[in-house]
Image (cartoon, rainbow, N blue to C red):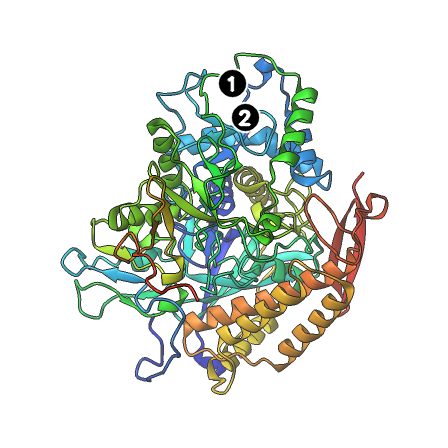
Amino acid sequence: MNSQIKVVPIETDVLIIGGGLAGCMAAIKAREYGVRVTIAEKANTVSSGCAGSGIDHMWAYLPTIHPEIGWSIEDLVEDHSEGMSGGLVDKDLLYFVASQAFDRVLDLEKFGINFRYKDSKLPDGFRVVPQFHSVPDALNFDGRYIKKYLTKETKKRGVTIVNRVMITDLLTTDGQVSGALGIGTRDEEIYSFSAKSVVFCTGRVGRLSKAVTGVWGNSSSPLTETGDGRAMALRAGLPLINMEFFPPPNPFAMGNCEVNLGAPRNTLFPAGSITGPNGEVIVPRTEFYDWDKLGREKVDPAETRKRWLAERRKAKPQYAKLHKEGKSPFYLDLTDATDEEVEYVEWSISNEGRGYRFLEYMKKHEDFNFRRDKIEFTPTTRGMASTASSGLMVNLDMETGIGGLFAAGDDVGGVPWKSAPGAVTMGWRAGEMAANRASTQKEFLGVDGERLEALKALCTEMLQGGRGHHWREVELAVQNVMDYYCGDVRTGSLLSRGIERLGHIKAEVSYNATNAHELMRCMEVRSLAENADLIMRSSLERKETRKLPSFVRTDFPEQDDLNWLAFLSVRLQDGRLRFERLPIT
Amino acid sequence: MNTKRDEEVYVFPNAPTPTRPVIFDPDHCNGCNKCVSVCIMDILLPNPEKGKPPLVVFPDECWYDACCELHCPESNAIRLNYPLMWKVPWKRKETGDYHWVGEKNPLPPNPKPPV
């Protein structure tokens, strides 16, 4: 049976795994050095990744505006470190992202994305809105088709894009990267890549908790994010950091639909308020963005930061408490907004995330109107939310512990909420360094035949396993374990039992796929289960509760900076997981 | 997806999502299969009959990101059929009436006397 699976060999100098924001930027940059560059993408680069259905803003230090008002890159780093990550951050990496983001914005502009607006009175015609930091530094842009533009640019530069291939194995020879193996998600074939350097751009693990509504995939990040990069890194013996910062389910949602609309102080910042059942105001509405206010007056960064941090602490209403007191449901109320504000909010929604088509649908078919109707708002009640704290460890060249292996974007740990700026800056740098490395290496190290045979055998087994489990049965079982044993309540005893139960599931499972599509899903669930194990074991190891990035251990309710202002790294060594604390210096 | 098992027949359990997450209008769809190419969850297959709308083969895996609709060269060829439990209730400010997607709005008051 093995012999029936066809192997497609592909040779390339630089192999990029995952064609999201980071992957496309890496490919575009790497091609400048004249090497052969290939992107292996599980879906299609035109629409894949977190930016797949659009993004409308990203933060950056703006050299034409911020120095004028006395706000430095160091101030941005300090804001981000204090306000977004409670000091648990790799400041050098953060500084790198902050200092490079604007240059990448200019690149994106060259690739055809509009960043300039007539209604702006700022020097360069930017729309700059507040988000994440004490001074407005998030640039708005027409990003609905950002992935389409990036795909066009990669093709123009001669990058080879291999869509519908899921990479499952990283290949190494004597601590050096030699390529990767993957499966065709439409053709039941194995793709064998021989490469001189490899860049991981696979994103986070998102599909690990069941959505509140029970509808599969009611999550704002794409369901293709199954932690494949983390699972491969683990198997290759690389350390992963901060895996415990995994948020349990129940994210921000509109009604019960998680559509990435955000909340007041977020995408709807300028005009929304949150009201209770009888119209009582819970979060008051804020001012509309004043496009030309920024830059008019100097700021005192330390004082601004202090005020901003205090406001942030105050601004978070205790929805869970209000709910228990019978003061729900809540409404997102834009009825007091002006036409200009509603127009802006709708423009913003239309460029970011999958809320756009949903809102169009509501307006067209259900006569919905923001000026007249309050929409029900289900706020998050979870105690933990720490986007992108976890991932691989890299240096400032985006290099990992394996020679020739680089990582970028959400595959990199240590900088929470680096999001789009993290993806574009790290991707660019990783592309440059991977190309340099590939051009200095003469020979290919060759594909490991044993690994290839092992993957063939695994696929054959899954495709023949008539009595095995359907991937969804396994996925639900893993998600159930995560939701209960590793949800909002995490204790030593609960986590230990969860690890045990997951172990039983993993021992019991035999996957059954009836075609290439299901084979991909089985491989994804295998990644999910490995990630779940890492998350639970790391959660068991971190014996403290941390405010930012938020992490709650019910049996260790205090923040313990003395011992735990540290990254927690985990790696597989001689068949066992080994943990190490890496204090923040 | 040229599976080697095209000739076999399978039975799938009912999924807790709309059985038709993506609805094609055959009058507007030109059968270009752009949506098949961009769908990140890969739930569509080209129609064996050329020029006809694609087939939704894995309806329960749709995550409603609307990429099919965003990249469709035609207008009104694709409509997403959102899951019932996502359909958001809202309240009209002046009247206080509740509205619910897919119902005759505003909803009539509950005629049952309180028990």
Query: Label 2 neighbourhood size at 10 Å, few (<14), some (14-19), many (20+)?
Result: some
Q: Amino acid at mark 1?
A: Leu
Q: Nearer the viewer, residue A391 or B97?
A: B97
Q: Nearer the viewer, residue A316 or A354?
A: A316
Residue A567 point in image, percent of width and height: 75, 48
Q: Nearer the viewer, residue A544 or A504?
A: A544
Residue A206 point in image, percent of width and height: 54, 57
Residue at 51% of width from left, 18% of height from top? A294
In the image, which disc is placed on residue A136? 2
Residue at 48% of width from left, 78% of height from top? A470
Is residue A234 something that shows in the picture? yes
Residue situated furthest bottom in the rendering: A467
Residue A86 point in image, percent of width and height: 71, 39
Total label count? Answer: 2
In the image, which disc is placed on residue A104? none
Is A305 located above or below residue B96 in the figure? above
The reply to the same-chain question for discs 2 and 1 is yes
Q: Amino acid at mark 2?
A: Pro
Is residue A186 something that shows in the picture? no
Q: Secondary structure at mark 2?
A: loop
Q: CB under 8 Å between callouts 2 and 1?
A: yes
Residue A1 point in image, percent of width and height: 47, 84
Q: Which residue is mark 1?
A: A294
Chain at numbered mark 2? A
Is A517 located above or below residue A95 in the figure? below
Q: Earlier in the sequence, mark 2 or mark 1?
A: 2
Chain at numbered mark 1? A
Q: Secondary structure at mark 1?
A: loop
Query: Left or right: A129 with respect to A350?
Result: right
Quadrant for the C terminus of chain A in the image: top right
Query: Label 1 neighbourhood size at 10 Å, few (<14), some (14-19), many (20+)?
Result: some
